[in-house]
Image (cartoon, grey):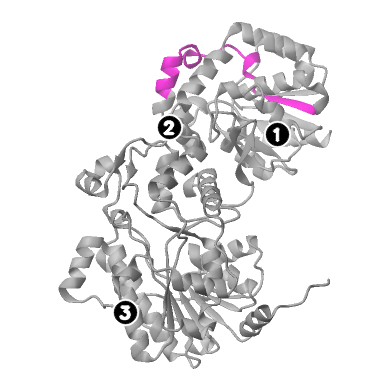
């Protein structure tokens, strides 16, 4: 492979990297993981300190999924031990230590916060002092922590800080001072990095961090954010994780950074109100019209505001001394990603992964634009096999099938349902746009999804290779009370629990975990009402008869799949017996109760295409 000429700056970085060995504490955390990725990308051997073998294996798998297969050695550290439980001799070649370890949780007891942040910080500096190469310590503090100055908290000032700020922030302030003081006393070179709230990867939005600003975004998404916090000047800056990792990676090699503190954040971050408004409009949810100053929020009962008091100290209008960090970044060719697009990718990733409830991996989760509708997609959006899921469930109810499907498969939430925006008014153009670029699709419709799959197939028979209808509701006996009464259905769906839904739909409340995400979606504003309207519409005898006639006249290949406990009407069974497969003991939702059998029938049909 031919490459272009290497610049002097790139050559200098490569030369420095060849002499480096980085020890990373907190390597399993959000920042730590991405720092390891960046260090390895720059050719730096990494020793990742982990608490247990299990956490090390988890990190190894995560790194592998992000392209890091070599270049990382794992050691176990005991943060309860004065020497951190590590073999100093094995670390003799270490040239830099990145300290991202600590306790990050609001509401911690003081002792837990002190041990996790202050004691750990001091012990890591003491380790550096014992090692022969006197490695540079890069200590990650925080953008608000650094603004308190270099004073080491003692006596009444310390007690007051813990009372006023809470254990987390106070312990970080104390740790910042202790690290600097201990490093100075022991002659250990150090640099402090003060990042702001860390958002997702600028390109993908990927993020595992769910507290702080992410929790506010979650409440906005779920319609539980009653008011915008703060005022028009409230500033909660962010920095993308990839930019932060790129900034941190060269720091220990630069003489100019010795003994310095750097505030790393995006000064172009919109004010908090504007940010939440932008994200709300992107989500296509109604943002709160009411705003509450921080002082008012402090006085309201926590049970009403749902706000942890420790987070309120982060809501102010202060700006931070970023000039030195910006100058350093410019000298080393670093450019902040474009602010708003990166924020919106982060917001998308959080919502698509249900704010941490779903771990990253296959199948891919994302939002796509379909006919102007923000549509949630599970799997490959270019797959030749597409699933339209049932009511009152969502695309996630098909996740097990999607994960095991041997070929590419896409499951989408219908407009206004699951995680998708829109409503029934979008459904005319939506399937046309969804499938327009796929001339040979295998379309699978489940329950109500079967009705809309059939209507598309009848309009575009030449575009389908095969049509599979799972538990087509329009061919089954007429539904019960929930379908007949929109009010009853709306109230029940809005208030149901996973256990109640599992008992009613699956006949087994122990299957409740499979329905947790669907119940969460039902809690979102207007979703339960939309589903009740669709159930009522689907139960209309005239519509059911029209769909049955459409299916009888359809010229393409059709495969019907039902559960033994959820049969078609006798007339439909007789009419379509040559294309009908029945799964023994299954009901209306075989993807949850009999996934192996359903997958076998779907893949055998696919293999026969």
User: Which residue sits at x=41%, y=32%?
Assistant: 497
Query: Residue 263, percent across and down?
Result: 42, 69
Q: Which is nearer the eye, 20 or 101?
A: 20
Query: Based on the displayed image, in which of its 4 quarters is residue 106 positioned?
Result: bottom left
Query: Could you tell me if the residues under marks 3 and 1 are in contact, i.e. CB atoms within 8 Å?
Result: no
Image: magenta residue range: 464-492
Asked if residue 20 is positioned above or below residue 313 in the image, the reply reads below
Query: Based on the displayed image, in which of its 4 quarters is residue 274 positioned?
Result: top left
Could you give the CA–CA distance between mark 3 and mark 2, rounded to whole angstroms? 47 Å
- Indicate whether residue 87 is drawn in magenta: no
Toward the bottom, the furthest residue is: 132
Residue 178 disc label: 3
Of labels 3 and 1, the one closer to you: 3
Query: Could you tell me if the residues under marks 1 and 2 are in contact, i.e. CB atoms within 8 Å?
Result: no
Residue at numbered disc 2: 523
User: Which residue sits at x=33%, y=56%?
Assistant: 317
Q: Which is nearer the eye, 131 or 192?
A: 192
Left or right of 317 on screen, residue 482: right
* Quadrant position of the C terminus in the picture: top right
User: Which residue sits at x=63%, y=62%?
Assistant: 66
Of labels 3 and 2, the one closer to you: 3
Residue at numbered disc 1: 386
Whichever of callouts 1 and 2 sits on the residue coming sooner in the sequence is 1
Left or right of 296 on screen, residue 198: right
Dot 2 crowding, Cα within 10 Å, few <14, some 14–19, many 20+: some
Whichever of callouts 3 and 1 sits on the residue coming sooner in the sequence is 3
């Amino acid at each position: 492979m031919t490459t272009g000429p290497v610049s002097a700056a790139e050559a200098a970085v490569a030369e420095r990297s060849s002499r480096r060995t980085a020890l990373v504490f907190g390597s399993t955390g959000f920042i730590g993981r991405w720092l390891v990725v960046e260090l390895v990308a720059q050719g730096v051997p990494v020793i990742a300190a982990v608490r247990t073998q299990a956490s090390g294996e988890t990190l190894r798998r995560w790194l592998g999924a992000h392209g890091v297969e070599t270049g990382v050695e794992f050691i176990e550290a005991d943060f309860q031990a004065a020497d951190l439980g590590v073999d100093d001799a094995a670390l003799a070649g270490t040239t830099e230590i990145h300290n991202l370890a600590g306790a990050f949780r609001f509401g911690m007891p003081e002792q837990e916060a002190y041990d996790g942040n202050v004691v750990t910080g001091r012990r890591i500096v003491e380790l550096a002092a014992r090692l022969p190469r006197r490695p540079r310590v890069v200590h990650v503090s925080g953008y608000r922590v650094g603004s308190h100055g270099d004073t080491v908290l003692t006596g009444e000032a310390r007690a007051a800080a813990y009372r006023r700020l809470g254990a987390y922030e106070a312990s970080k302030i104390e740790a910042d001072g202790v690290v600097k003081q201990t490093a100075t006393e022991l002659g250990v070179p150090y640099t402090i990095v003060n990042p702001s709230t860390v958002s997702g990867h600028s390109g993908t939005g990927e993020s595992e961090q769910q507290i702080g600003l992410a929790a506010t975004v979650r409440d906005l998404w779920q319609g539980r954010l009653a008011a915008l916090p703060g005022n028009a000047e409230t500033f909660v800056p962010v920095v993308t994780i990839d930019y932060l990792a790129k900034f941190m990676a060269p720091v220990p090699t630069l003489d100019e950074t010795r003994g310095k503190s750097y505030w790393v954040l995006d000064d172009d971050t919109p004010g908090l109100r504007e940010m939440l408004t932008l994200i709300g409009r992107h989500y296509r949810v109604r943002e709160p019209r009411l705003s509450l100053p921080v002082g008012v929020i402090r006085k309201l009962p926590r049970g009403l505001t749902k706000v942890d008091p420790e987070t309120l100290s982060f809501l102010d209008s202060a700006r931070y001394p970023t000039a030195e960090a910006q100058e350093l970044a410019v000298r080393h060719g670093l450019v902040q990603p474009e602010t708003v697009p990166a924020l919106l990718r982060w917001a998308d990733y959080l919502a698509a992964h249900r704010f941490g409830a779903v771990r990253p991996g296959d199948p891919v989760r994302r939002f796509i634009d379909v006919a102007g509708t923000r549509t949630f997609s599970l799997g490959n959006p270019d797959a030749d096999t597409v699933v339209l899921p049932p009511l009152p469930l969502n695309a996630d109810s098909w996740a097990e099938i999607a994960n095991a499907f041997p070929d590419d498969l896409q499951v989408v939430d219908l407009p206004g349902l699951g995680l998708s925006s829109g409503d029934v008014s979008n459904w005319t153009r939506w399937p046309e746009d969804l499938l327009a670029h796929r001339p040979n699709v295998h379309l699978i419709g489940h329950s109500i999804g079967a009705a809309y799959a059939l209507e598309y197939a009848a309009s575009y028979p030449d575009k389908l290779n095969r049509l599979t209808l799972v538990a087509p509701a329009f061919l089954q006996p007429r539904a019960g009370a929930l379908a007949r009464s929109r009010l009853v259905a709306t109230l029940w769906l809005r208030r149901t629990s996973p256990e109640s839904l599992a008992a009613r739909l699956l006949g087994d409340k122990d299957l409740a975990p499979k329905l947790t995400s669907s119940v969460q979606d039902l809690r979102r504003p207007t979703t339960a009402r939309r589903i009740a309207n669709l159930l009522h519409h689907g139960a209309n005898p005239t519509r059911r008869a029209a769909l049955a006639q459409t299916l009888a006249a359809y010229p393409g290949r059709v495969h019907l799949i039902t559960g033994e406990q959820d049969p078609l009407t006798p007339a439909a069974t007789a009419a379509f017996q040559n294309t009908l497969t029945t799964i023994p003991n299954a009901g209306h939702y075989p993807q949850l109760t009999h996934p192996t059998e359903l997958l076998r029938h779907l893949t055998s049909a696919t293999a026969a295409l």
